[in-house]
Image (cartoon, coloured by chain):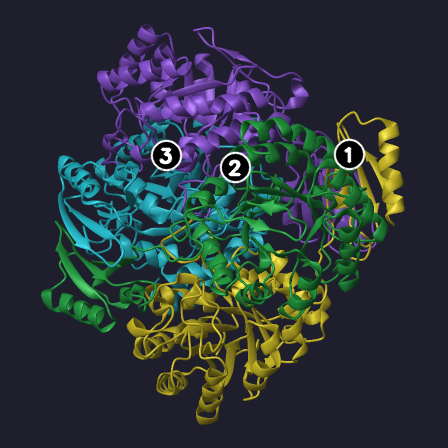
Chain colours: A cyan, B purple, C green, D yellow
Amino acid sequence: MIIVLKPKTSKKDEAVVLKEIRKLGYRPHVMRGVERTVIGAIGDERTHGTLETLVTFPQVEKVMPVQKRYKLVSREAHKGNSTIRLGNGVVIGGKKVQVMAGPCSVESEKQLLSTAEAVKAAGATVLRGGAFKPRTSPYEFQGLGEKGLKLLAKARRQTGLAIITELLSEDHAEMVAEYADILQIGTRNAQNFQLLIAAAKTGRPVLLKRGLSMKIEEWLLAGEYILANENPNLLFCERGIRTFETYTRNTLDLSTIPIIKKESHCPIVIDPSQGAGRSDLIVSMCKGSIAMGADALLIEVHPNPAEAWSDGQQQVTLEGFAQLMQELKPFLVAAGRE
Amino acid sequence: MIIVLKPKTSKKDEAVVLKEIRKLGYRPHVMRGVERTVIGAIGDERTHGTLETLVTFPQVEKVMPVQKRYKLVSREAHKGNSTIRLGNGVVIGGKKVQVMAGPCSVESEKQLLSTAEAVKAAGATVLRGGAFKPRTSPYEFQGLGEKGLKLLAKARRQTGLAIITELLSEDHAEMVAEYADILQIGTRNAQNFQLLIAAAKTGRPVLLKRGLSMKIEEWLLAGEYILANENPNLLFCERGIRTFETYTRNTLDLSTIPIIKKESHCPIVIDPSQGAGRSDLIVSMCKGSIAMGADALLIEVHPNPAEAWSDGQQQVTLEGFAQLMQELKPFLVAAGRE
Amino acid sequence: MIIVLKPKTSKKDEAVVLKEIRKLGYRPHVMRGVERTVIGAIGDERTHGTLETLVTFPQVEKVMPVQKRYKLVSREAHKGNSTIRLGNGVVIGGKKVQVMAGPCSVESEKQLLSTAEAVKAAGATVLRGGAFKPRTSPYEFQGLGEKGLKLLAKARRQTGLAIITELLSEDHAEMVAEYADILQIGTRNAQNFQLLIAAAKTGRPVLLKRGLSMKIEEWLLAGEYILANENPNLLFCERGIRTFETYTRNTLDLSTIPIIKKESHCPIVIDPSQGAGRSDLIVSMCKGSIAMGADALLIEVHPNPAEAWSDGQQQVTLEGFAQLMQELKPFLVAAGRE
Amino acid sequence: MIIVLKPKTSKKDEAVVLKEIRKLGYRPHVMRGVERTVIGAIGDERTHGTLETLVTFPQVEKVMPVQKRYKLVSREAHKGNSTIRLGNGVVIGGKKVQVMAGPCSVESEKQLLSTAEAVKAAGATVLRGGAFKPRTSPYEFQGLGEKGLKLLAKARRQTGLAIITELLSEDHAEMVAEYADILQIGTRNAQNFQLLIAAAKTGRPVLLKRGLSMKIEEWLLAGEYILANENPNLLFCERGIRTFETYTRNTLDLSTIPIIKKESHCPIVIDPSQGAGRSDLIVSMCKGSIAMGADALLIEVHPNPAEAWSDGQQQVTLEGFAQLMQELKPFLVAAGRE
């Protein structure tokens, strides 16, 4: 930690700060600058108590942390890229870019199976579909619940696709883990730490969506909750952040691809459907994602978006999805991926 | 719903949209404008399926909702101001502005009881204190758990203060409700709908903090989850939103006071400690809150902020709190409050 | 400046950084921490070249500035509160809270003079009114230009009110300064540094609105352009920042009142009309502003808002303004102001 | 315009609104819904007075615009893609993706010419370099001024590269236009409408950077100022928007590429240097930009970033740039560009 004192702080007031630093377990190191005195507090910031509280002393101008706060998810902890192997043999984080596709919500057997067949035929390897849906209003469709999970399991048996579905209650963790190959943590639960711990403990791979207004550091630290609870299979998923812009539902932050690659060893997945909130931008966003190094895509696909029970405006049709997969091929080649 | 068609849409393409509107349960009403045709879709937007999905038709330019989505929390549903009566007889939402004060985290019996005595002496009527703490990093202090709840109960017995404490797991709902007079839902769980439902079902008053990047409408709808689960005792709590500014930890949006008063009948509480993230702005923010009509304040107070186990930088001292309470008096008079 | 090296940086790589620090005019001071080495670079950050460029060295993890970048506007430069005396004897920044009121745009002699008489009668001391209007679309009303300025001058003669009006072109600086007592710099020009310099050079007091997405530090530095160009008469004006919220046009950040008072000696003015973008929140925002210590208010008033040529939705009526001024009185008393 | 009345508005109050709508030049059309009455106001929203002011009537709940506000920049106004031909024959907006590269600031003849030679050799066709620099602090390097322009002209003579440089004062418009092939309008001046008009009137192509917190619609409308002032040669340039994230300097919004292509006929340019504010993310961002359909890139390149006089942290080295250009080739092929 670096503690900056206000200009003209007396020796006596400085001594008070030095004493407190020692009391809190750090070794102080004083540097006298042109205008201000700066104190370096030496010690492991992640294991000692924080020194940020020192700003409550009137003679302290600011306190600046030096260390990164995340450990296990960091690139320093694991030099190579982590890969995640699913039940059907699919590997995420390797040379092949995986596509996870399917409806926003599981609505019926026919809707789900027709979509599953179509996305499989077009090249997807994981089927997405929400059985429990977090909805802004209590009057909106909340998902089919376990019935939806059973339909997902049936689709897996029929197509061989792996399954990703959202977990939104600690109480459902075991049940959802029984049916799903990957547990998705949604953007509104990205800092619901109890849910993160419950998800980690199932042992299933966890896809952690970035919170609506989550800084990169906070996202990495939320991921740290998964690894610190002894589950090494974590995927980060960027799905757009909340900004002032209203043309798109969210602002998809594609710079997270090189950033997560730089800071972490875990795979990075892009969800352009939530990012755009409108289907007409999705092809372009997928091309950009692949060019920038994404490990997987998560795309909402529906046989009839105009009649979808949730988020129809951002779902692409079965035909649209098949064409999208074709259009991505040259970019996979350019990126040296499959 | 208002559906705006693109300029030069053919009659045939228009007919497709009209047919779909009828199919989804609405009655269409066509208006031909100078450049564009606009269709009013008549029906209750909250009970029918959404028409927002119609933007997936290429001939549709945009879809605009007409109705407000919240019902039970709305001022239209209840003309008067709702009041909430706590176990110790304290009423929130009435003429008296209530002050809830106490440490960020419960750390020890001595810390909690000394704070409780001091805030009571200064005029607070509710004691705050976190027993379960949601922390950005898994390596930070996570709270004393039930032991902290027991200390809060002891403080209540000794001082007569009511207790507010955070609920952060569905699994703890019953336990926390046993000890607390008000359940606090934190900003990171503001759209954790399962937790909202669990909190509502305890029957205890629920204080719902605004999410870090929650629009007013979303906040009202999250509150709707409480009332729709048959718990009428909801308090909205503004605690600052996330913006680009870094001088303060968050940007306290005091305009929520007149807005909540206009849109809802539920009380509005202001938390300046989280809003500022630094103790030196709190007095001013409290004055503004009272002048603008807040029903209660939620303030972090600690006997020794520099050694607090969490968020010391935003906690005021016992003396600071006593002085703050004095400084607020003239503003209570000006606002016609007590 | 504090330069943080990456963990396990070799002595050789460290030496490269030390050499560059010396070359750029600073004296390096090395601190070896538990994991990382930190270098304090001693020298005046405001006069030497910046060291932030050092992050381009691969062995550098981050560079953190220690000093504040503003000087003349800072509280350190001038312990007391600066006051600004206008032509009509009105003093801003003293014990009396001044109210600046008038229409968004000057539209006609009748509209302006009736408004001027009414706001004066209600207690305003400065008349606002736009003659040159910055409009989002080129097809919107752009203001009456010099004709509008002449009407403002006439209103001043008739009422004794001082005049504030916006400057939006360097080329108009002399002309506008001839008519105005205070030059207003609008939010979209808050970092139009050439305009700031031109405004400063007229010698007239300058009211600097905060930019839509301007950090406090950037705002203070923009103000520094005024004082550094030898004009000591600067007023900061908060008018709301751009956030994700859409209920209000902008998010009025009232915490700027104690912040500007802490960091600077210049007066702080609040513009609730722009902040809210809707007239129904203005009374409450004005009460909060006074309670929190604002030196002046800037309020849009129009005889018939529904027919205003610009921003009618945020203008209050003449009667509404008179009532507002009455309602503020108890808060002025509470705040120890007049 | 759509005017939504509050529930239970009386016929008399409705009549008041209808009368005002007619008075303001629109034809009202009433639709009675389940809960609310909605009035469609028929007329050209871009030429009549606005009806948004009607929200000042207490019986009006909201007013929603139907039409898009921009005309000349819109895709509807011009079906094909506009192309812009520079003095050296380079065409922007055609099949070839153009690269504009050079230092943040022009510092010296040697720095500029060595950079120009290197970027030309690597494949750039336009040289960027700031002669007038808008700086957050008045104490930072403000650019070489006309001397810098002369150096740019010299570099053009020696290399054949076209020149892009920033215009930041109306008073410099003619002078800068004499030297530059493209005038750049910076992010802080993106709604400095007087500067936009002055730039348009020079007849030079204008590159309009998106403002720090500019909505897409506002950006298009700022562009409308160029075309409405009879200059058809407009380039939109995305350079990152301001969000809560602090890892990057700004958040580069690559979704603007498909959005501008959809809404407008003008070319879209991406500036990853400002977007990232750090050089290590630039290669990835350039790949994404090309995959998503950008017409040109604007990249900061410096012979020695650690000693740059401005923004060194985001400038790439000459070698870095040459390598970047190589790495982009497969993505150009994949995108069907050159």
The numbered disc on residue C319 is 1
Please say if D290 is above or below A212: below
Give the answer, above or below, for where A99 lies relative to B178: below
| Kind of residue indicated by mark 1 | Glu
In depth, the one of D20 and B38 nearer the eye is D20
Q: Which residue in the rendered view is the most extreme toward the left?
A: C11
Amino acid type, mark 2: Gly
**Chain letter, disc 1 residue:** C
Quarter where residue C43 is shown: bottom left
> Which of the labelled discs sits on residue B219, or is there none?
none
The residues bearing labels 2 and 3 have C-alpha atoms spaced at a distance of 17 Å
A38 sits left or right of B79 in the view? left
Q: Which mark is residue B279?
A: 3
* Dot 3: chain letter: B
Q: Earlier in the sequence, mark 2 or mark 1?
A: 2
Q: Residue at x 33, y 32 (%)?
A: A193
Q: In the image, D8: left or right of D23?
A: left
Q: Secondary structure at mark 1?
A: helix
* Structural distance between the alpha carbons of marks 3 and 1: 40 Å
Instruction: Determine crowd level at label 2: few under 14, some 14-19, many 20+ residues with C-alpha closer than 10 A.
Output: many
Residue C310 in sight in this render: yes
Q: Contact, CB < 8 Å: mark 3 with mark 1? A: no
Identify the mark at residue C293; answer none if there is no mark.
2
Residue appearing at x 23%, y 39% in the figure: A51
Q: Which residue is located at x 53 percent, y 63 percent?
A: D188
- Which one is nearer the viewer's eye here, C215 or A152? C215
Residue A108 appears in the picture as rendered: no
